Image (cartoon, rainbow, N blue to C red):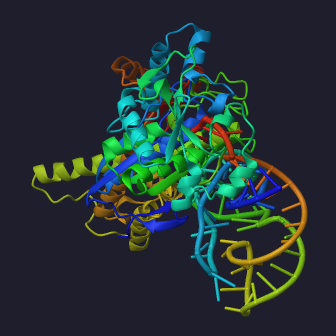
Amino acid sequence: MSQLKVHNSYTRQKEIFTPLTPGHVGMYVCGPTVSGESHLGHARPFITFDFIYRYLLHLGYKVRYVRNITDAGHFEEEGREAEDKIAKKAAIEKLEPMELVQKYTNLFHWAMHRFNNLEPSIEPTATGHIVEQIGMIETIIREGYAYEINGSVYFDVKKYAAHYPYGKLSGRVLDDLLETTRDLDGQEEKHNRQDFALWKAAPPEHIMRWQSPWGQGFPGWHIECSAMSTKYLGEQFDIHGGGMDLQFPHHESEIAQSTICNKHIPARYWLHNNMITLNGRKMGKSYGNQIRLTEMFSGTHPLLTQAYSPMTIRFFILQTHYRSTLDFSNEALQAAEKGLKRLWEAYDLLKKLVADEAALQAAGAATGETPGNGSPATAADPVLDDSIRKLLLELDEFMNDDFNTAKVLANIFELVPVVNSLKGGQIRREALSPDTLQLMKRYFDDYLEKILGLKGESMGDDHKLTGVMDLLIDIRKDARSRKDYATSDKIRNQLLGLGIVLKDEKDGGVSFTFA
RNA sequence: GGUCUCGUGGCCGAGUGGUUAGGCAGAGCUCUGCAAAAGCUUCUACAGCAGUUCGAAUCUGCUCGAGACCUCCA
């Protein structure tokens, strides 16, 4: 099997992934700022790094996945809104800051859960690590790369750039920044405009504040990630992830801070997911075009023609490579919804087929007979059998190639007609060897559920409901056998009105799904 | 203005210099009491121009267009 290759934003190349400590992976992903509700765009990094996390686990790595919660709030830089965002909104909503933080943290966790994202190993909060942040800032000052003015501390970018490759991650040149940095209020106390805050003195109205060697204040935007990643993953770790829009200035600043404190770049592999767009434009609050997750799930946003389930959104995201932009539209989401449904029904079928096969073998074994009805050990259609195995084995190659979930799904979709044909009889069961059928089931289990993190939308395991359905299906069967189609159609149509779709199978059986 | 990315068939999207991406939608057929589902077949592509090459959607240049970052941002 091929080795895992990842696209490293830092080198702009695909590189073979080699963890610092064999068998172990440390991964840090920038988490949400819990000052408001998450929107569709936010779903992308957390789903992306979830399948990356899952795949690393699948490969057998022991992974420590750290994803922070930014609950201190980043202030708008340099005085435009010299107020902690969280404190500001809290005043508007008449809530305690921590109450607000709790509310949106809960909402975030709820959304993550619905997306079937695994929980990170550690989910540290910024407010819980003020001490570490202050410690790091002190180190940077001691090293001579930060200075204090009026109770605030700034990172000396110019000095840093003279000794280290500043701007490499984001492809930025310091001189360009000098020219393009805007005039903002409060700039004058900084030595240079491109310097960024490590610690900000808190104005009197600022609610969230902590005591520091420089007086009462709050931490700058970038220091929390440096402090927490260092604390939980060490001075250098394997993967740092986040959205592409965080490359500058956030990740660039993290690199600078950690380089001064720890003497080397914090992470070896920098992975960035691309944006979700709406009519070709990035979804984000700056553009006022975001659709909140609660609105997605309920279909309440004016742009939505219907509600979209968390799994539909997950699947929608998985159908695209994580480094490409993904354009939202109702049509695209509906396509994803239908595709996922077809895929999942085939997967359910496959599970049944394999279970039946196993039962047959078991029955044969129990009676001591050779499994006359079972499949022979060899494939009657070796060409088909081979092509299936090839499609399956390619899945590993695709994932190893920078997590190409789009290709993975394409191959799996090629197998959907095979599964359906096994059920429909267009392909005889003997055509495939039992091994191949088993292999297919294993790969579907691994890829669809374990790695891509998809799951069946629960249609309710209500025994009473299934009982009633069995009864109705039974009555309808009787009616049909009497050619009483008025009755049989009435049952079917009325169930359809309730959102339950009956399907008459070829073999006389009847199945039902929820529309 | 600076830096960078992208432009694929009705829509969403993969893509290696030479072979079908895939999904959804459309068309035809099969199955079916009808329907749904399913199966089979099928249509429309690589922004434009020029170049490199035996051969380019895939490399180079130019033109046009879109977007991202440079400010909080996933």
What residue is rendered at 26% in x and 65% in y? A376
Q: Looking at the picture, how far across and down is residue A31, in whole percent? A: 47, 36
Q: Nearer the viewer, residue A447 or A390?
A: A447
Residue A222 at least partly seen: yes
Q: Quarter of the image holding residue A22?
A: bottom left
Q: Nearer the viewer, residue A181 or A381?
A: A181
What residue is rendered at 71% in x and 55% in y? A176
Name above or below for residue A448 compared with residue A19. above
Q: Looking at the picture, how far across and down is residue B32, in whole percent? A: 56, 42
Q: Looking at the picture, how far across and down is residue A289, in whole percent? A: 71, 32
Name above or below for residue B45 compared with residue A413. below
Q: Quarter of the image holding residue B49?
A: bottom right
The N terminus of chain A appears in which quarter of the rendering? bottom left
Q: Quarter of the image holding residue A285?
A: top right
Q: Looking at the picture, how far across and down is residue A398, in whole percent? A: 46, 63
* Left or right: A394 as drawn, with respect to A503: left
